[in-house]
Image: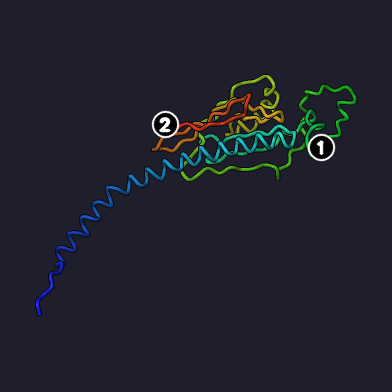
Amino acid sequence: MPRRPAFTLLELLLVIAILAALATMTMPKWGMLLDDRRLVRAGDQVRSSVARLRVEAMRSGRVIMLEGMIEGTSLRAKPFYSASDATEAIDQTGSGSELLTGADQASMVVVEEDETAIETIELPDGIVVKSVNVVSAARAMEIEQLTVSDQAQGWSRPVLFYPDGSTSTALISLAHPTMGRVVVKIRGITGGASVSEVLAP
């Protein structure tokens, strides 16, 4: 019976060594590709959250704040409770009696905050909030003054979503230590948001 050709043990070991070398060269590229996708996913996640919070502000009739933990992995959204929006807010947390007695409609008297209404937005692994730049606006000043204690704890200035559909004009920068960053741009008048391409670190 004729002998069939076969691989020797040496040839098999050589093939395995070559495959292992190829794998070690391509693994970092796969890791970089995954990190790049995480950045893109984080940008899309924040962009969709911005759209949802804008709709929620219009639906509820209440200002909603979005703050980022600088160098942290999360953002948080929470409604702003004040006497001025008590007559329009869907949950009617105030009686509106201040308006009947001649109080200024624009006064910001903070009502006790509902802790269950705070929503945390967790970013993908390895992605941090690098910065939140908000353009100053006159109607946001009083709210921002009331969030100074949050900023002392590491939270950013709030991006505000108003019941009329407008928002703060802002840039939210999300970063990965080696892959770079993406920037979510929020346009104040329209409330629209867009995400940049992945930028170099």
Viewport quadrant of the N terminus = bottom left
Which of the colour schemes (rainbow, by chain, secondary structure, one colour) is used? rainbow
The type of residue carrying mark 1 is: Gln
For label 2, the crowd category at 10 Å Cα-Cα, with few meaning under 14, some 14 to 19 and many 20 or more, is few
Would residue 100 be found to the left or right of residue 141 on screen?
right
For label 1, the crowd category at 10 Å Cα-Cα, with few meaning under 14, some 14 to 19 and many 20 or more, is some
In this view, the residue farthest toward the left is 2
Would residue 106 be found to the left or right of residue 166 on screen?
right
In this view, the residue farthest toward the front is 1
Relative to 94, say whether 120 is above or below.
below
The type of residue carrying mark 2 is: Leu
The residue to which callout 2 is attached is 199
The residue to which callout 1 is attached is 92
In this view, the residue farthest toward the bottom is 1
Instruction: Kindly identify which numbered label has been placed on residue 72.
Output: none
Quarter-wise, where is residue 171 in the image? Answer: top right
For the residues labelled 2 and 1, the Cα–Cα distance comes to 44 Å
Mark 2 or 1, nearer chain start: 1
Residue 67, image x and y in percent?
61, 34
- Please tell me whether mark 1 sits on a helix, a strand or a loop: loop
